[in-house]
């Protein structure tokens, strides 16, 4: 670039002359600069407006669905312990809730390792571990074996744990492992154990022994603590307290087993006695109450032949009865115990012989022994039948029930009236009842002792996966001997009782009959939370009101921008023009242009029209047409509305709207009386508006997706202006350079001329 000499020889203001010479080109360049500036302002205006249009578009995207108009609300009497929401299909009414447990995530905090233990420390460097082993990790029902060697580092072990499905980390500052399940709930819990002895040793060296689940030993099936440090059973669970009292648990287990053992033999003896007493009583009762030989036979389960024989005996006449008594070869009258009466009747016998010996001492003695004679020494049919009955009863019970011979003899004595201890059978039965009552009481006491002590054993077995007392005792002893300081929290399901019905979940959130219940804290003993579900009129009303408010703010701004005052004659200022004005004048000048930048804009008019059209449509619900006016939502019109607010909607009865607050609240009444109509109409209205905006915001060659104006086209125009302005700037610079060169040459010539003139004057003057 040439050195510029500004009028040293000529005295001319070459800077001003050059600027005037190139001014025509500068004006052309500035026209493009102003056009580009105006375009950038228009881009900014559209970017701001497009954000607001997209915000409304996003809002109504959710309002298209029925779930957005939740016509129900649920409230809880204790919001610190539960959070409840209701869907549209929730049932109105009041329900009772108990929170028995909140969901817990399985967690294991390792014991503190030795000072200096870092992520790079190997297992062989840890006290207590040598050799190779396997650690078994079970998480979410999947089991993974992790191989450990003396060269395994803590960092590698952490990585292997994470690969096995748990979340693991090592805190080098606190020198502890932190391991947790991925999700809450019992089914998502994890276990960490040695698959072999070396694996167990490795866990011990890492202080990750998780067999000491103190919380399990400390709680009963209701979740209440068993032991505190002082041995009480009603305090808050503490790992240290419980660990200190594991010896108490062992003593309780041992005493419970001893108590059960002490009553085993007495219980067995008493149960045998009870069986005997009941059999004796049954025998006596049957003997006393049987009405006939035949009935006795049926009760005793005798064979058909035996029943037939007994029936025959019962029906014998005196003469036939005699036939059952035979004489032996020596002529002695005997009772044939081996022959059936029916067989005897079919045989010939010497009746005269019977009659001849009837009064003999032998017969009398025999009959007396058998109890078959009356007071006159005559054969007594009833006595004979009773004798047969007694014999059959004894035989039957001896075959079928454990009735001892003493009882049989006792009954015979009572029947014969010879017993001195018991006056009759009723007294004897009363005595047997007393024995049975005493025996049953003893058995109940023994069983209660066993039950009480079984509860002691079972309360621990229940919370320890059902293992019996002996296995639990062994595990507790092992835990005490292998204490590494690790703390284990078991993964637990959340459990609630709603209206007396129990529900479980791996998380603390329950979905039950339209209610979403999030359990936050356990309720206390006897405490119930009341959940009340009812129609949410305010919720739906506010949802519609918020939508109308956002729409109004946008449509009012669009109406204002579209109908803005003209800024004809106003163009963006050049730097020289700004220098000639004050800052306030510049600000007001540019505001005039910016406020009118979207005046009568075709794109703006198009978007405004599709929005107004969608909002003014009528939609059918259950065969009846509804519009916003059907719900008391109307515009005020040009005459009644404020400037640029003629397209805004007003809700009748809205206390926040001065223009409509005095009108009847039709919308709220409709929500109260028929929320389904309001919901279905709003779904259709917002869907129509959403679809109209969605179609307008689709990507084209001129505009980007989710943009209502031609942003691509504007960007292209802006870049073209930049190129054009650069060309004109180059042209102005080139012309300036050319003029400056010419003026420089002129200045140089004048300087030489002045120099020559001075020299000539000097010669002439000398």
Image: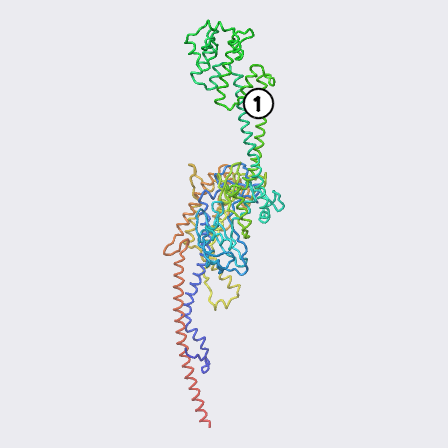
Looking at this view, name the residue that lies furthest to the left: 701
Estimate the x, y position of residue 671 in percent, counting from the top left: 50, 39
> Above or below — where is 11 with respect to 720?
below
| Quarter of the image with the N terminus in it | bottom left
Q: Nearer the viewer, residue 606 or 372?
A: 372
Q: Residue at x 58, y 29 (%)?
A: 441
> What residue does disc 1 label?
432
Depth check, front residue: 655 or 678: 678
Q: Is residue 540 visible?
A: no
Location of residue 246 with respect to 726 vertically, above or below: above
Local secondary structure at mark 1: helix
The vertical placement of 285 against 498, above or below, is above
Towards the viewer: 220 or 547: 220
Mark 1 neighbour density, 10 Å: few (under 14) some (14–19) many (20 or more): some
Q: How many marks?
A: 1
Residue that extends furthest to the bottom in the rendered view of this protein: 766
Work out whether residue 152 or residue 512 is closer to the camera in this orientation and state it: 152
Q: Position of residue 252 (x, y in %)?
A: 58, 41
Using the rendered image of the protein, determine whether residue 272 is visible from the camera's viewpoint: yes
Relative to residue 348, is residue 664 drawn left or right?
A: right
Colour scheme in the image? Answer: rainbow
Which residue appears farthest toward the front when viewing the image? 330
Residue 260 in picture, x, y percent from top left = 56, 36
Return the x and y of residue 4 as percentages of the image width and height: 44, 79
């Amino acid at each position: 670039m040439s050195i510029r000499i500004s009028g040293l020889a000529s005295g001319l203001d070459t800077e001003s002359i050059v600027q005037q010479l190139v001014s025509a080109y500068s004006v052309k360049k500035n026209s493009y600069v102003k056009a580009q500036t105006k375009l950038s302002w228009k881009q900014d205006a559209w970017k701001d407006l497009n954000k607001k249009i997209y915000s409304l578009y996003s809002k109504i995207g959710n309002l298209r669905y029925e779930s957005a108009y939740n016509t129900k609300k649920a409230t809880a009497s204790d919001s610190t312990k539960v959070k409840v929401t209701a869907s549209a299909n929730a049932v109105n009414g009041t329900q009772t809730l108990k929170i028995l447990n909140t969901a817990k995530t399985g967690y294991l905090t390792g014991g503190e390792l030795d000072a200096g233990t870092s992520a790079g420390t190997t297992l062989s460097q840890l006290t207590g571990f040598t050799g190779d082993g396997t650690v078994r990790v079970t998480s979410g029902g999947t089991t993974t074996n992790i191989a450990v060697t003396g060269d395994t580092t803590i960092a590698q072990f952490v990585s292997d744990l994470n690969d096995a499905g748990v979340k693991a980390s090592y805190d080098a500052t606190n020198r502890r492992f932190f391991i947790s399940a991925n999700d809450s709930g019992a089914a998502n819990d994890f276990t960490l154990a040695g698959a072999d002895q070396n694996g167990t040793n490795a866990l011990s060296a890492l202080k990750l022994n998780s067999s000491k689940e103190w919380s399990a030993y400390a709680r009963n099936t209701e979740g209440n603590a068993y032991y505190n440090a002082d041995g009480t059973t009603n305090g808050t669970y503490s790992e240290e307290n419980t660990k200190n009292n594991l010896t108490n648990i062992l003593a309780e287990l041992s005493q419970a087993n001893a108590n059960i053992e002490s009553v085993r033999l007495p219980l067995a003896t008493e149960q045998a006695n009870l069986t005997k007493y009941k059999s004796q009583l049954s025998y006596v009762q049957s003997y006393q109450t049987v009405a006939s030989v035949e009935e006795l036979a049926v009760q005793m389960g005798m064979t058909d032949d035996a029943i037939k024989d007994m029936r025959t005996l019962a029906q014998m006449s005196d003469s036939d009865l005699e036939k059952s008594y035979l004489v032996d070869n020596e002529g002695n009258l005997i009772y044939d115990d081996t022959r059936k009466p029916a067989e005897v009747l079919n045989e010939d016998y010497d009746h005269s012989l019977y009659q001849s010996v009837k009064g003999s001492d032998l017969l009398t003695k025999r009959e007396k022994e058998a109890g078959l004679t009356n007071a006159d020494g005559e054969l007594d049919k009833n006595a004979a039948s009773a004798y047969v009955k007694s014999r059959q009863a004894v035989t039957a019970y001896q075959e079928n029930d454990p009735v001892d011979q003493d009882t049989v003899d006792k009954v015979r004595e009572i029947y014969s009236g010879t017993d001195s201890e018991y006056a009759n059978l009723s007294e004897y039965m009363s005595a047997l009842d007393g024995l049975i009552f005493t025996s049953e009481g003893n058995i109940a006491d023994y069983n209660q002792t066993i039950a009480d002590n079984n509860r002691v054993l079972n309360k621990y077995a229940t919370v320890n996966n059902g293992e019996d007392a002996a296995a639990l005792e062994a595990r507790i002893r092992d835990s005490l001997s292998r204490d590494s300081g690790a703390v284990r929290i078991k993964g637990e399901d959340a459990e609630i009782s709603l209206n007396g019905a129990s529900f479980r979940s791996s998380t603390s959130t329950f979905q039950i009959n339209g209610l979403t219940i999030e359990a936050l804290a356990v309720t206390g003993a006897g405490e119930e939370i009341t959940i009340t579900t009812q129609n949410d009129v305010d919720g739906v009303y506010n949802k519609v009101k918020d939508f109308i408010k956002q729409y109004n703010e946008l449509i009012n701004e669009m109406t204002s921008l579209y109908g803005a005052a003209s800024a004809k004659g106003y163009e963006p200022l050049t730097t020289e023009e700004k220098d000639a004005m004050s800052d306030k004048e510049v600000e007001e000048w540019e505001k005039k242009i910016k406020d009118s930048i979207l005046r009568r804009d075709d794109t703006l008019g198009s978007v405004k029209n599709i929005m107004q059209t969608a909002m003014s449509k009528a939609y059918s619900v259950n065969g009846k047409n509804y519009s916003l006016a059907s719900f008391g939502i109307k515009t005020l019109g040009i005459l009644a509305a404020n400037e640029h607010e003629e397209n805004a909607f007003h809700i009748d009865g809205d206390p926040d709207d001065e223009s409509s607050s005095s009108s009847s609240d039709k919308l709220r009444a409709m929500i109260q009386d028929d929320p389904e109509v309001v919901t279905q109409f709003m779904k259709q209205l917002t869907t129509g508006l959403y679809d109209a905006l969605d179609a307008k915001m689709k990507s084209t060659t001129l505009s980007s997706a989710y943009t209502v104006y031609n942003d691509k086209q504007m960007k292209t125009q802006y870049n073209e202006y930049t190129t054009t302005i650069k060309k004109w700037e180059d042209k102005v610079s080139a012309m300036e350079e050319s003029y400056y060169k010419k003026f420089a040459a002129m200045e140089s010539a004048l300087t030489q001329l002045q120099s020559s003139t001075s020299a000539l004057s000097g010669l002439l003057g000398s």
